[in-house]
Amino acid sequence: MQIAARPATGGTILDITGDIDLAHSPAMRKALLQEIKEKKTAKVFLNLEKVRYIDSSGIASLVEGLKASRDQGSRLILYGLSKTVREVMELSRLQKIFEIHDSEAQALAS
Amino acid sequence: MLLKLELQSNPEALCLVRATVERAAEVLHFHDAETRAIVRSVDEALANVLRHAYRGRPGLPIEMSCSRVEPGGEKAAQGGIEILLTDKGVPVKQAELKGRPLDDIRPGGLGLHFIHESMDEVEFTRKKGKNLLRMVKYLSPSSQAAASEGEQKCR
């Protein structure tokens, strides 16, 4: 899994590539919490277009990120979810808890 | 038996297992959503072994086998797949086998829920100092219909 950060309107986009599983979710969690808690970024956009798989540890990291962003008064915005990732979100019944958009353009305009 | 894998408790092995199980499910003519459910269950079950049974210690043994369930009976009219996972870690606590309520929004506790939602049969037992997890997924009639249309899954 690879994570790259780039600036965006009002915040930062984290581009995630690969599988978010037990081996790699700690790295995503670290990047996410660093952006939210340490850098205090107002809007963190998580680009999941190139994520093929996410497991429950990845979902747990997203929930932790969401809680941290709420504590900071910032926003965590997800976009580009594949069918596999959407399925896991639905299984977790978390799709309504997160702010989710189909594309980067929609996410940035939100 | 379709395949038997002898694994070690290393998180890096998970992606290889997912790819292998995905192919096994395809060969048995599961459709895409069912295949994703099977892959997800095996991955979550292995992750639980790594985190809970072996408490994060690497290099410890896990065995996984996949077998074809032959068609027959009410549940298995179209056949299916049976997956067995065995580890020598600490016993699974019965109280933890149901996962947590989903309306409790917090990190963790989702893996078991995914497994129960994704598979038709899930059974934990402990025998001779080993944890044994048996998971079964049956083929749906739509999967069988796709297979009978002449799809060549295994070349």
Image: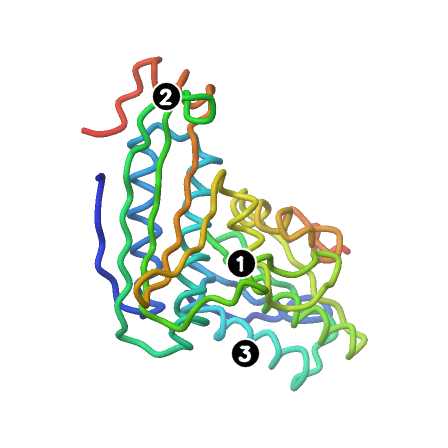
Chain letter of the residue carrying label 1: B
Q: Secondary structure at mark 1?
A: helix
Q: Whole-percent x and y of residue B2? A: 22, 39
In the image, B129 versus B69, the foreground residue is B129
Give the distance between the C-alpha atoms of the residues marked 2 and 1, in whole angstroms: 30 Å
Whether the residues at callouts 3 and 1 have beta carbons within 8 Å, the answer is no
Which kind of residue does numbered mark 1 sit on? Gly
Which kind of residue does numbered mark 2 sit on? Gly
Which kind of residue does numbered mark 3 sit on? Lys
Give the distance between the C-alpha atoms of the residues marked 3 and 2, in whole angstroms: 49 Å
In the image, B27 versus B131, the foreground residue is B131
Residue located beneath label 1 in the image: B111
In the image, B99 versus B129, the foreground residue is B129
Chain letter of the residue carrying label 2: B
Q: Nearer the viewer, mark 3 or mark 1?
A: 1
Q: Dot 1 surroundings within 10 Å: few (below 14), some, or many (20 or more)?
A: many
Q: Quadrant of the C terminus of chain B?
A: top left
Residue located beneath label 3 in the image: A30
